[in-house]
Image (cartoon, rainbow, N blue to C red):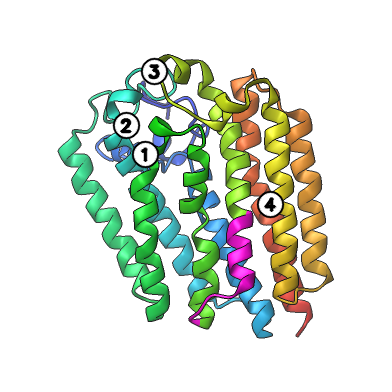
Amino acid sequence: MTVDAHGLPDAAPRNWLDRYAPLWLKPFGRLARWDRPIGWWLLLWPCWWSAALAAIAAGRPFPPLWHIFLFLVGAIAMRGAGCTYNDLIDRDLDAHVARTRNRPIPSGQVTPRAALVFLVLQSLVGLLVLLQFNRFTVVLGFASLLVVACYPFAKRVTDWPQVVLGFAFSWGALVGWSAQFGRLDLAPVTLYAAAIAWTIGYDTIYALQDREDDAIVGIRSTARFFGARSRAGIALFFGIAVLLMGIAFVAADAGPLAFLGLVAAIFHFAWQVATLEPGDTDNALRRFRANSTTGWIIFAGLLLDAAIRL
């Protein structure tokens, strides 16, 4: 089955949505970014890291599988809801950017009213997931909505919208821990800060794709702010992320396998920075997507560390 004319340039090639979904579902799937799973993976990783780190601190051989499943469903639902909300707010800006003008709302495939209904449905799925946790985690989850609501406006007022995205996308680093302990401690708070730095790094890579169009329409980003120093800026925030993760691991009394995974992640970060070509949009997109592998590396180290203690 061939991809129809409304496929988007940063979608995964030959993704399931374009190949198999019925025609009526495709625009809504694109609105939720179902054809670009990297987004929900990046939202999910802080949740899973935190859950695994909490298992280490609690002396468990593995984080609760029910929590792992709930975080997966919640990440897919809330990433879709966040993208739908973002596209509703940005529909006029998106129409003037080459990479986004074909999105469902500015291209007319989905009306704003239909997008709003779809947003509510996805949010209800996220709410159902959140209500499975303890009261502290439910309150903590609701607190994240304020940050999510602010993100689409950040790019209009600051050169650092990636920081706001980091606040939103890293929230799972708090939730994964609180779901097991019903509280927050130094380890999850430090992991949250690390995930924010990681988000600034990878989303700067992502923003390299749009620097020229963003300058024309007035969208601000760290990619524009760093300019010719983008590679150095990305390396700086990846380095901060590693340092803060190390502190979080120490605070949770993690063992050598967790730190071995972190060392492997350092090499993966170094590869991203060394091979990044800021002027090549395809190269930037591939390096951005590679951060899902970073997530797997860190998670594997934490899981092995928890398991070996048994």
User: Where residue 180 appears, x then y in whole percent?
Assistant: 53, 80
Residue placed at 62% from the left, 22% from the top?
A: 227
Q: Earlier in the sequence, mark 1 or mark 3?
A: 1
Residue 232 on image: x %, y %: 73, 32
Lower sequence index among marks 3 and 2: 2
- Give me the C-alpha separation between circle 1 and circle 3: 15 Å
Residue linked to disc 4 = 241
Residue type of the residue flagged with mark 3: Val
Mark 4 secondary-structure assignment: helix
Q: Residue at label 1?
A: 152
Tag in front: 3 or 2: 3
Which is nearer the N-term, disc 1 or disc 4? 1
Q: Quadrant of residue 189?
A: bottom right
- Disc 2 + disc 1, Cβ < 8 Å: yes
Question: Which residue is at the front of the view, 158 or 90?
Answer: 158
Pointers 4 and 3 in contact (CB under 8 A)? no
Say which amino acid is labelled 4: Ala
